[in-house]
Structures are given as C-alpha cells and as structure tokens.
Amino acid sequence: MKALKPISWRKFLSADPNHQVVGVDEVGRGCLAGPVYAAAVSFKSGKFTNLVTDSKLLSAERREELAAGILLHHQVGIGFATVEEIDEINILQASLLAMRRAVEKLEIVCGHILIDGNMKIPNMPSQYEQTTVVKGDLRVALISAASIVAKVTRDQLMKDMATQYPHYGFDSHKGYSTAVHKKSISVHGPCIHHRRTFAGVKEYLTLVP
C-alpha cells in the first residue's frame, strides 16, 4: 500500500490573528447503538502537534493518555447527534450535524476547517473556510487529535451505557456491529440506545414493547 503523504495544518494559517485552523473528525458512524460523536481541535501550544495516526490504531490506554493531553493543552469542541436524530435524518446527516456542533463549541471568530473524509459541513457560517481530506486522520495532525478525542469521549459513554444495559456488551464493542452484539440484539431485542432504522436492529423491533 502506498504511504499517505502527510499534510501540514500550518499551510492553512492566515495573517489574521483571529484566524484559527481547526481539525474535525467523527466517530461511531457505523455503529448499531449510541450517538455519533465529533471533535474539533485547534492547537494552542506545541504539545501533541506532531501526532498523525488513526485513533483506532492506538491502544485504549494510549488514546486516553493522548486525549487528556489534547484537552489540557489545546482548544477542543465536542458535539454529538442523538440516536433519535440519526434515525430521523440518517447517519450521514447526523455525522455532519455532530461535526458542526463540535466546531460551534469552539466559539472562534473565523477559521479554516480541515475535515476528515470527502464532505464539507453544511450550514456553516461564511467566515469558515473548509477543506476535506480523505484519510485525514492519517495525514493531518489536527484531524488525528480530533479523532482521538472523539473516540475516547464516545467510548466512555458506551462504557457508562453498559452499566445500565450489561447484556449487550457495550463496554467491549462500543456499539459496533460485532457478532456478539448482533446476537445479543436477536436475543434481547433492541434497547433505547439502538438505532432503529439500521439493519441488524430494525428486524428485532417486535421483540420489545
């Protein structure tokens, strides 16, 4: 496989002192349960700024360590779209909504948003430029940082959810479509945290009141 060429987030900087470069990524898009989360990160110091890796390639312990450092040293916004919103507007639109909410949490005056993937965020104010980067979490440090924060935040939510619904195993698979997860849905039926429009869930809605 051909190595992906890194992209420096600094090339998007502006002479405007209010201008910030922001990396954005989402997590949980392919899950059967739980909200979709997104994080937006703007670097404020030199710490953790050279990290370029997919959050899924890191151990859980390393992700948590890095997320704590990113949250401590940089400006971070976290957004999500609920299961109800996912079922109402579809997962793609919900993912974009979560990303917009994450950027809005930063409350920046103007900036250039670097987005993982190939779709820009709709309904963003005109003071934000947007650039999409395919495999951005493997190429742009800002997007990598956003990916790590989003995953750690969502994973913790799924662990908390597992204490309420232990028979689904949310703490292990985090809501993804694993064989164990699909089996538990077929036995117990979906719970309130499952995405009812998704294949693997909607077939078992008759199992619950």
Image (spheres, rainbow, N blue to C red):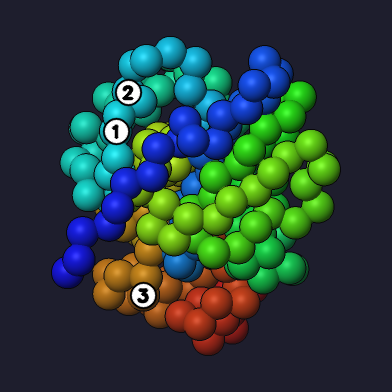
**How far, Cα to Cα, is label 3 from label 1?**
35 Å
Secondary element at tag 1: loop
Q: Residue 51 bears which disc, if any?
A: 1
Instruction: Give 160 or 100, whichever is nearer the viewer.
Output: 100
Is residue 91 depicted above or below 128 in this figure?
below
Residue 174 appears in the figure: yes
Is residue 172 toward the left or the right of residue 131 in the image? left
Is residue 18 depicted above or below 190 in this figure?
above
Q: Residue 182 bears which disc, if any?
A: 3
Which residue is pictured at 32% across the width and 76% down the height?
183
Q: Quadrant of residue 143?
A: top left
Residue ID for mark 2? 48
Q: Point out the tag, 3 or 1, that comes first from the N-terminus.
A: 1
Q: Image quadrant for the C terminus? A: bottom right
Which residue is pictured at 34% across the width and 16% down the height?
47
Closer to us: mark 3 or mark 1?
1
What crowding class fits label 2: few (fewer than 14 Cα within 10 Å), some (14-19), or many (20 or more)?
A: some
Outermost residue, front side: 15
Type of residue at label 1?
Answer: Leu
Q: Residue 165 bears which disc, if any?
A: none
Instruction: Give 77 or 15, whichever is nearer the viewer.
Output: 15
Instruction: Give 33 or 55, whichever is nearer the viewer.
Output: 55
Circles 3 and 2: CB distance less than 8 Å?
A: no
